[in-house]
Each structure stands twice: as C-alpha cells, then as structure tokens.
Image: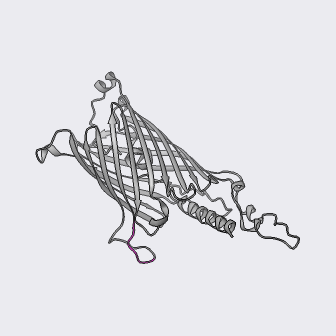
Amino acid sequence: MRRLIHISLIGMFMSLALVVRAQDQQYTQFYAAPMLLNPAFAGTSIQSRVAMNYRNQWPTLPQAFVSYNFSFDHFFADIKSGVGINVSHDKAGTGALTYTNVSLQYAYEFNVTRKISLRPAITVGYGSNYLDINKLTFGDQLARQDDGLTTLDPDRARFSQEPVAYPDFGAGFLVYAEKFWIGASVYHINEPVHSLVGRESVLPRRVSAHGGIRLKLSEIGAFSKRQFIVPAFNYQLQGLFDQLDLGFYYEYDPVVIGLWYRGLPGLKKNANNTINQDALAVLIGYEINNMQIGYSYDLTISSLSPNSGGAHEISVILEFASKKSKKKNKRRVMPCAKF
C-alpha cells in the first residue's frame, strides 16, 4: 500500500509538472531575470551584466520544481544597441522531466524626446523538453499477470524517448525616463509544438505588461538622499492562466527590502469560486561594489498552501563597466527595480 501511495504521489507531481511546463519559468525577482521578462532589457546596464537565478518551488514536495537561469547582456554605445544571451533550465519531480531554452536578444535604443527613451527588441531561441522515462514507474508495472509477472510496460510507449526541440521567437519594447519605465513583451510568438506524448500540444504565447516608478524620498520628506521607494507591477497572460504581481521595493543603499502580492483579487475567481490569489512574497537584497544579491520567499496563500512549502529564490547580479565606458556612455540609465 505504501508503494502504491508513493507511485500515486509521483504521478500527481508529474501531472502538475506537465501542466506547469505549459507555462514559462516564473521568478518572484523577475527584474533580476531581465532577459526572461522582456528582450528590451538587453543592454540596460552601463556596459555589461551577468545575472544568475535559482528557484525552488514547493520544496516540501519531492523535488517538485527547480529552476535555473543565466543571462549575459552588453550595451554597445557606438551603435546604440544591447545584445544578450539567456539560458534557462527546469527540473521537475525526481528530475525525470527537464526543460532547456537558449535564446539571443537584441534591442535598439533611441530618444523619443529629450527626456524619454524607447527600446524595441526581438529574441530568437531554441527550446528542448525531455522526459527520462527510466526514472518513472507506471501503473502497468505494478499490475500482475496470471503467471505472477509484471507486464511489459505498454504505458512507456506513449512518451517520446527523444528530446522534443523547437524554435522560439519573441519581441518586446520598453519606454523609460528618469523616474519611470513601462514595457510589454510577447514570447513564443510562433506557439511551438512541444508535446512529449505524441499529440500536438503548443507552448502558448506569454504576454507581459510591466512597469514602475522610482521615487526619491528626500523629495517628499525629511529622508536621506540614499532612500527610494519603487512601486512596480507585472501582469502576465499565458494560455488559460493570468496573474498580476504587485508590490514595492524600499531601497536604502546598499539594502533593498521588497513586499509583493501575486493574484487577481476582485477581478477574477478560480473554478471553485474562490479568490484568485497565489502568494505573498518578501525579499531582501544587498548591493556591494558591482554585485547585487537577493533572496525572496513566497508564502503560498492559495488552496495549495498547507502542502507546498512556498518557494525559495536566490539571485546574483554582476555589473561591469570600465571608467572609459562610463565616460563614453553618457546615456540615461533606466530607473528599473534591481530585483
């Protein structure tokens, strides 16, 4: 009986994984994974930037969902262009289901007015899904024949034993000034087929709208010039799923503290007529020299709350710029949130 329960749990987790894989990686610190949010973020640092992200979602489940992300981007002042590369990897369940995506980003920057800049951008990538069926136990492996032997696993034949690969395309734009930014992006424009079970299943387009404003507290009260409040938002729609991340950061150099809410309260209800909400998230970050480190925890407030364990997330960002490039690159710096 214990073995049957264990197999049932694995099956449930793999079903969840296949559903979640119909969506993209999700990070609470989405501004610390800029290439995943919008290709127009390529080259928004002074010169070069490296970003690394790790997320462990629902950690009380048996290694349910673990995500890794790495990106590098650079701004070429001579041609007013930003380029980037992003590598993402997901691991679900016991590691049987994995997803990898490698993409390139290009953004062009120009001034609309003396105070406002625009960055249109594109991204081109390659995705791959793989299911290692040797790490799975199927129900027919537990079924006994008349001779007492197990069957020959016909369920395994339903799954592709080779990685499923596909091209991937996206686009986006950003508008920003000294104190605000706003943008939108769409990924998987071509809605690539990524099914592992022999039937057509597409990766739905992901549409995102995001923005924020950076307020210096010394301008509205008796605060230090090093203190800022940064309210921001990110709305995402992918297939049948949509969500709104709404929150703010308090920055007192070199410390950043953030509080976020994820859900659509009052705007949309779930299928069981309950409030559509997912999580509350708290974040703390620290900046030293050219490095930023952030940690966040998602407290699940949906019906999954008692069982999930929330989510832990760590981000590390490194920025590099020589004195020569700082002097040469005198363009307006985007006031975007750090995490």
Image coordinates for residue 19, horizontal then vertical, percent: 55, 63
In front here: 233 or 217?
217
Residue 200 in view: no
Q: Which colour scheme is used?
A: one colour
107 on left or right of 9? left
Q: In this picture, is 18 found above or below 321?
A: below
> Which quarter of the image is occupied by the C terminus?
top left
The quadrant where residue 275 appears: bottom left
Image coordinates for residue 221, horizontal then vertical, percent: 11, 47
Image coordinates for residue 286, horizontal then vertical, percent: 33, 39
Magenta part, dominant SS: loop
Residue 142 in view: yes
The quadrant where residue 243 appears: bottom left
164 on left or right of 22? right
Magenta segment, which residues? 272-277
Q: In this picture, is 155 found above or below 112?
A: below
The quadrant where residue 260 appears: bottom left
Q: Which residue is drawn at 27% across and 30% down?
A: 330
> Which quarter of the image is occupied by the N terminus?
bottom right
Residue sticking out furthest to the front? 2
